[in-house]
Amino acid sequence: MSAAADRRDLAALGTEAQDPRTRDLDRLAVAEVLELMNDADATVAGVVRQALPQVAEAVELVAGSFRSAGRLVYVGAGTSGRLALLDAAECPPTFSTPPEQVIALLAGGERAFTTAVEGAEDDTDRAAADVRAAGVGPRDTVVGLSASGRTPYVLAALDEARRLGARTVSVACNRGAAASAHADVAIELPTGAEVLTGSTRLKAGTAQKMVCNMLTTAAMVRTGRVFRNLMVDMAPTNGKLVDRARRIVAAAAEVDEQTADDALRAAGGESKVAIVALLTGAEPADARARLAAADGRVRAVVEPRAE
């Protein structure tokens, strides 16, 4: 494709369109600018809802990877990559997952998280090399995020991941995105024109963040890292989280916070062990063994018939 044709192709994307409602953005009062932005943001959840069937397929792929000791590997450039890295970084403190279980590959490397690395998103050779260097294989699910749906780094990374046998998912913010043909599951989120033309850190970024939230949270639910709606695998690594763990155990076992605190101490700070011990009357060592036999699923231990 010629450079001119490539520019025409980019200009035709919904994410590059100009919103006529915001043509006089620079003449508006601050309150009016904020109202327009808020109105635009209100449309994002509906767009994501339309893609829930595809998001559900992707969740099952990710959960399958987790069950087989595989990983979720995000790939992205610019805002998309930074959002992916943010989601990956939140998994260990939220679910006590090892840091390597959910990772993000950014065009331009880790320094691209805080600094723009010019030309990185066009480097297809680097994309393939990054995927290989990460050791991507058949047990992994690779999720490529690209607002335009045509970022060369992301497309090349998805292709290399497929060649290596990994499951692949694309997340794009345009219909008929090029990335959709490079993935086993294609999630298209047509968020349309931005309040600030072409600034896909706005609606498109919000839509991608929502999907990242869904992928990791729902996959963790599917793999037993949640009991009811509680973060029972959360790592209590600071004062706030120690207090939260106490309240989580108290809510799960329906006991007072002092009883929960005593159980947590006896369980070595492991919320799941404390909950199972309180709900079954088992000693911490036995509770830990029961959890191990149930793949860490609290409900399978305390309500076996429900499973």
Image (cartoon, rainbow, N blue to C red):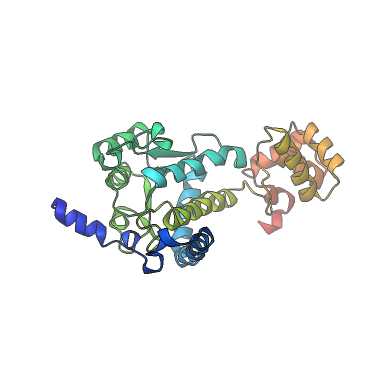
Residue 111 in percent (x, y) is at: 40, 32
Relative placement, left or right, of 110 versus 34 is left
Residue 22 found in image quarter:
bottom left
Relative placement, left or right, of 241 versus 85 is right
Count every numbered label the image shows and give the total: 0
Residue 170 in percent (x, y) is at: 37, 53
Relative placement, left or right, of 240 versus 55 is right
Q: Point out the image quarter for the C terminus.
A: bottom right
41 up-or-down from 160: above or below: below
Of 96 and 60, which appears nearest the observer?
96
Residue 295 found in image quarter:
top right
Residue 129 in percent (x, y) is at: 29, 34
Residue 23 found in image quarter:
bottom left
Most distant residue in the left direction: 2
Q: Is residue 142 visible?
A: no
Relative placement, left or right, of 38 versus 300 is left
Of 24 and 98, which appears nearest the observer?
24
Residue 263 in percent (x, y) is at: 81, 37
Of 271 and 307, which appears nearest the observer?
271
* Residue at screen point 54% across, 61% down: 31
Q: Is residue 238 visible?
A: yes
